[in-house]
Amino acid sequence: GTEQFDRVISTIPIPSVLECLGIQPTFKLRYLKLLSLFYRLRGQVGYNGAFLYNFTPDGPWKRITTFSKYFGEQRGDHYFTVECTVPDNDQSSVAEKQHDFEEHIQRLGLMRGTFHREGETTTANAYPIFEQGKGESIRKLRQLVLDSGIEIAGRQGQFRYIPSAVVAKESHQLAAQTRAVA
């Protein structure tokens, strides 16, 4: 069947959108992979927020999303996801990333207890690499998508980072405005 929409918003990688449109990109974007490790922790989490960012020069991880901070502990266990960027030349195994994360987070005193890795997934084109001197080529690829009527959101070339707290606040405001109009 056919469906019509007032807006189409894409968060998938620009080369994938162009491929769907039948457009051959003139420039190849580079990406970092993202490895997400899913955990259950029987123990203590030594921070208050649902998100914890690694700004230290050590450790293979960049962010922890602690779901038990949102939804509460389940039978005394914390649940969280650890995100690790994976450069092209990184040959570390998942087990090595797991070990390095657990050692690092405990050394920082941010988690104590027994870690259980429940699974993992890899996102191949998670983070575009915007190389110096390639800005105009990247803008042209983005413009091909925009010219087709598709808006681009997320980390696929917007050069904007919006924290989750801001997104939540804006979502509540938009929902209130929508209810007021309806």
Image (tube, grey):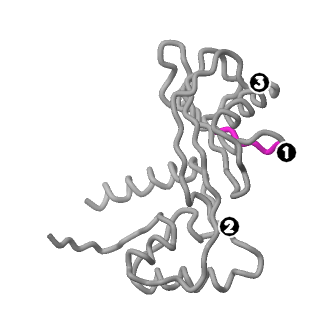
Q: Position of residue 99 (x, y in %)?
A: 71, 29
Q: Is residue 46 above or below residue 4?
A: above
The disc label shown at residue 89, or none: none
Mark toward the start of the polypeptide (2 vs 3): 3
Mark toward the start of the polypeptide (1 vs 2): 1
Left of 83 or right of it: where is 112? right
Left of 95 or right of it: where is 39? left
Q: CA distance from mark 2 to mark 3?
A: 31 Å
Mark toward the start of the polypeptide (3 vs 1): 1
What kind of residue is marked 2?
Ile
Q: Is residue 169 above or below residue 178?
A: above
The disc label shown at residue 57, or none: 1
User: In the rendered structure, which segment of residues is drawn in magenta?
Assistant: 51-57
Which residue is at 47% across, 84% downward? 24
Q: CA distance from mark 1 to mark 2?
A: 20 Å
Q: Secondary structure at mark 1?
A: loop
State which quarter of the image contains the N terminus.
bottom left
Asked whether the beta carbons under mark 2 and mark 3 sit within 8 Å of each other, the answer is: no
What kind of residue is marked 3?
Gln
Left of 108 or right of it: where is 30? left
Q: Position of residue 40 (x, y in %)?
A: 55, 23
Which residue is at 27% across, 72% downward? 5
Residue ID for mark 2: 129
Q: Position of residue 131 (x, y in %)?
A: 73, 73
Disc 3 crowd, CA 10 A, few/some/many (<14, 14-19, 20+): few
Which residue is at 63% across, 60% downward? 161
What kind of residue is marked 1?
Pro
The disc label shown at residue 106, or none: 3
Disc 2 crowd, CA 10 A, few/some/many (<14, 14-19, 20+): some
State which quarter of the image contains the C terminus.
bottom left
